[in-house]
Image (cartoon, rainbow, N blue to C red):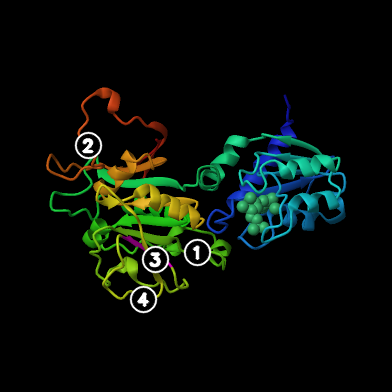
């Protein structure tokens, strides 16, 4: 059993902090941070991965450390890669720099790596240890880990409701149930996601733009000016091919290239959509778009995290297909009453054994609303 020192913990905590800087920009790659410390515990190099196709965290840290990397310890939030991807293997770079020890928070779930990076280091005589602050490291890359292990993205369903659990009036009106702070919080979650998923009913009723308004995120000026900030792919399910072309969520983004909408339908739309709207025909199961195939498709497109903003039907269908990993519910101190719309449309249950159980992870107040985060 490995025992890590207080200094080890501090260094890895710093590496995790650095990794988080990539939270809006690294996908499809994971968020990774690296700290290099000399024998006295002085930090001689720091780095984090910024964007797929650019150098990995270790390379940035090694460049900063220069000659001082020799004999030092590298703390990395993810096992150094062993393969030639868009960039060369980090394990080789660490060996070449002659570090003496590498501590990683977790193994890389990428089948191209998965232990080979650590083996390579060990074979070169470098001491390795795994598992320091692993829970925090896994939290950083839930989407990447799930895509690599399961072939599906991490799915968060976001819903906004009143205290009595209603998402809209009976006539569908819902703007706005939650306050501006909760809506700003949603912007942050959208920005961390690779895709925003919605259904035709919701986009036709509310006409949302489903984009990220970075100016509302409260980012530091240097973060805001990063050329790497991206817009999530907007994925709209339209099983009945009823979407008109005029909706806000189908319009091109100024800051984005073509290809930023994926319209998933049963057959090609009769409408002529602009080039940035791709279409994909999903298989049907029981007269409905097969949501398992939809998620497998999004994973194959290298989308790690999917943020769902949809109505009760799609949210309920995802839930019943066991495709939801996390629920984020914003609850406003308002009451709508009996005939308002529900959070999830699920089949009437017959016994308490069938009730959907969630695990609460976080409850906090955001502005005037309550934010509940629960895992399925
Ligand atoms: C690391 N350090 O900072 C990151 C790693 O195509 P590439 O070259 O960018 O390789 C991508 C893969 O490398 C990615 O799927 C994951 O397995 C690993 N990411 N590894 O040593 C890093 N971002
Ligand atoms: Zn690497």
For label 4, the SS is loop
Image quarter for residue 236? bottom left
* Disc 3 packing (10 Å; few <14; some 14–19; many ≥20): many
Measured in 3D between alpha carbons, the distance from the residue under mark 3 to the one under mark 1, in whole angstroms, is: 13 Å
* Residue appearing at x 35%, y 53% in the figure: 183
Q: Answer whether residue 196 is magenta in the image.
A: no
The residue at the point 72 percent across, 32 percent down is: 6
Judging by the rendered image, the residue that carries numbered circle 2 is 347
Label 1, ligand 1: CB separation under 8 Å: no
Residue at image mark 1: 230
Q: Which residues are magenta?
A: 260-265
- The reply to whether callout 1 and callout 2 are in contact (CB within 8 Å) is no
Numbered disc in front, either 3 or 1? 3
What kind of element bears circle 3? Answer: strand
User: What kind of element bears circle 1?
Assistant: loop
Q: Which residue is labeled 4 in the image? A: 274
How many neighbours does mark 1 have within 10 angstroms: few (below 14), some (14-19), or many (20 or more)? many
Name which residue lies at 34% across and 41% down: 321
Which mark lies nearer to you, 3 or 2?
2
The N terminus: image quadrant: top right
Q: Mark 3: is the Cβ under 8 angstroms from ligand 1?
A: no
First of labels 1, 2 by sequence position: 1
Residue 304 point in image, percent of width and height: 50, 51
Considering depth in this image, is 216 or 322 the residue closer to the camera? 322
Q: Which residue, given by chain and number where applicable, does mark 3 sit on? A: 261
Q: CA distance from mark 4 to mark 3?
A: 10 Å
Provide the secondary structure element on which disc 2 rests: loop
Image quarter in which the C terminus is found: top left
Q: Are marks 4 and 3 in contact (CB under 8 Å)?
A: no
Left or right of residue 45, residue 352 in this image = left
Question: Real-space Cα distance between discs 2 and 4?
Answer: 38 Å
Q: Earlier in the sequence, mark 3 or mark 1?
A: 1
């Amino acid at each position: 059993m490995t025992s890590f020192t207080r200094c080890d913990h501090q260094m890895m905590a710093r590496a995790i902090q650095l990794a988080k800087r990539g939270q809006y920009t690294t996908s499809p790659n994971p968020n990774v941070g690296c700290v290099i410390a000399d024998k006295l515990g002085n930090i001689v190099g720091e780095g984090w991965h910024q964007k797929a196709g650019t150098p990995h965290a270790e390379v940035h840290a090694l460049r900063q450390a220069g000659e001082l990397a020799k004999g030092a310890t590298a703390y990395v939030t993810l096992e150094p890669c062993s393969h030639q991807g868009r960039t060369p293997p980090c394990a080789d770079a660490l060996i070449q720099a002659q570090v003496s020890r590498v501590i990683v928070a977790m193994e890389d779930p990428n089948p191209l790596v998965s232990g080979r990076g650590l083996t390579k280091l060990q074979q070169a005589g470098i001491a390795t240890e795994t598992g320091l602050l692993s829970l925090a490291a896994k939290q950083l890359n839930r989407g990447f880990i799930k895509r690599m292990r399961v072939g599906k993205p991490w799915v968060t369903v976001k819903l906004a409701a009143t205290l009595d659990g209603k998402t809209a009036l009976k006539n569908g009106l819902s703007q706005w149930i939650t306050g501006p702070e909760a809506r700003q919080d949603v912007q942050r979650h959208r920005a961390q996601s690779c895709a925003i998923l919605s259904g035709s009913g919701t986009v036709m009723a509310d006409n949302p733009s489903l984009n990220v308004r970075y100016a509302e995120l409260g980012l530091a000026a240097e973060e805001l000016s990063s050329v790497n900030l991206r817009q999530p792919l907007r994925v709209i399910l339209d099983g009945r091919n009823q979407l008109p072309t005029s909706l806000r969520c189908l319009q091109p983004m100024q800051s984005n290239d073509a290809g930023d909408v994926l319209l998933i339908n049963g057959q090609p739309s009769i409408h002529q959509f602009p080039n940035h709207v791709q279409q994909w025909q999903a298989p049907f199961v029981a007269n409905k778009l097969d949501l398992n195939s939809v998620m497998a498709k999004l994973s194959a497109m290298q989308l790690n995290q999917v943020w769902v903003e949809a109505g009760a039907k799609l949210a309920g269908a995802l839930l019943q297909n066991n495709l939801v990993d996390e629920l984020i519910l914003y609850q406003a101190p308002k009451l709508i009453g009996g005939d308002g719309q529900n959070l999830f449309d699920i089949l009437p249950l017959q016994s308490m054994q069938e009730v959907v159980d969630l695990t609460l992870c976080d409850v906090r107040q955001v502005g005037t609303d309550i934010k509940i985060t629960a895992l399925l």
